[in-house]
Image (tube, rainbow, N blue to C red):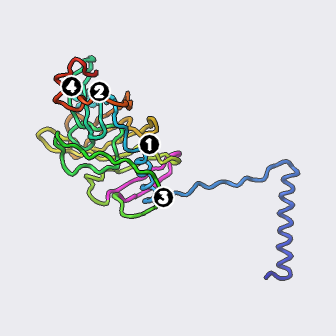
Amino acid sequence: MIRGKRLTAVFAALVAVVALVGAFGRSGVAAPAAVASPTPLPSPYVLLAMIRNRFRSHRPPPPFEQYVISRKQFTNYGYPDYNDTYTDHVWYRSSDHAALERRETELGDIGPLRFERPVFNQATDPGPPTADVFEPAPTHSLSPTFVPTPEVSQPPTLVTVRVQGEFDYRVTSVEREGNEIHLTLEPRRQPDRNRLRQLWVDAKTLDLKKLVTTDKLFIQGGPVYPVLFTVNFGMLEGIPVIKTIHGVVYGGYDGDGQTVDYTYTHLIFPKSLPSWYFNPRDYAQHVDDAPE
């Protein structure tokens, strides 16, 4: 309850406010507009789960991919390393990570048919451009005959249930940087398998724009060195795809290729590819009709 003089004072203040608003209207000057505050971000772990779910909402990837991956590196003296600078044409099947590859030389010559399984964190070039970057690295080196388990198609969403439980990473910082959100991550366990270290995502859609992840450099007959990859993303047909990778080898490595760059170009998603592309035993029978 308000009494006597206090009530009179409150009434006088209200009259003054009304008069001020009227004065703005009579003078033709608009009243100051309210400043909209930015939408607050969810908790770091919910945000990370949302980013992962957004990325995987585009999966599984198309059944077939055709692309060109170019690798460029320098010697430890700073000169172009022509032995390990090359361009590979790749025809890839996502169901089992099988790929037909042909190498193009600096002079434009196309090499022989070669069977590969492009994958990160193994003794092969990284790939494919639609790789699941949230997938933990394998626990051991994969043999040439290894066939990965195909990705399961996402079932239709009937109801959304938010569960905030144990995650593979600890989020150490979240920053707004213009139109992007920057997360810094630290693995809770198994740092060799949980490879993500930083993420940049679109602040509106949460689509990946860039990330920093660990990888490995395998020296034939020698040690394995740690690598840090900076991976840049784009969108193709509504699917996030890797565009470029910049790698830096550390851990005391002082040989050629301390830095390496990969560029993905000419990516398309064919409706189908011949089955013999993915069976190296058939390559000798198809030399004349092999793709270039």
Look at 51% across and 48% down and name the residue there. Answer: 203
Total marks drawn?
4
CA gap, disc 4 to disc 1?
A: 34 Å
Look at 16% across and 23% down and name the residue there. Answer: 284
Look at 24% across and 37% down and name the residue there. Answer: 117
* Residue 138 seen anywhere in this rendered image of the structure: yes
Residue 107 part of the magenta segment:
no
Is 105 on the left or on the right of 166, as rendered? Answer: left
Look at 88% across and 51% down and name the residue there. Answer: 26
The residue singled out by tag 3 in the image is 159
CA gap, disc 3 to disc 1?
A: 28 Å
Residue 228 in percent (x, y) is at: 30, 44
The residue singled out by tag 4 in the image is 113
Q: Which mark is residue 248?
A: none
The residue singled out by tag 2 in the image is 89
| Whether label 3 touches label 1, CB < 8 Å | no
CA gap, disc 4 to disc 2?
A: 10 Å
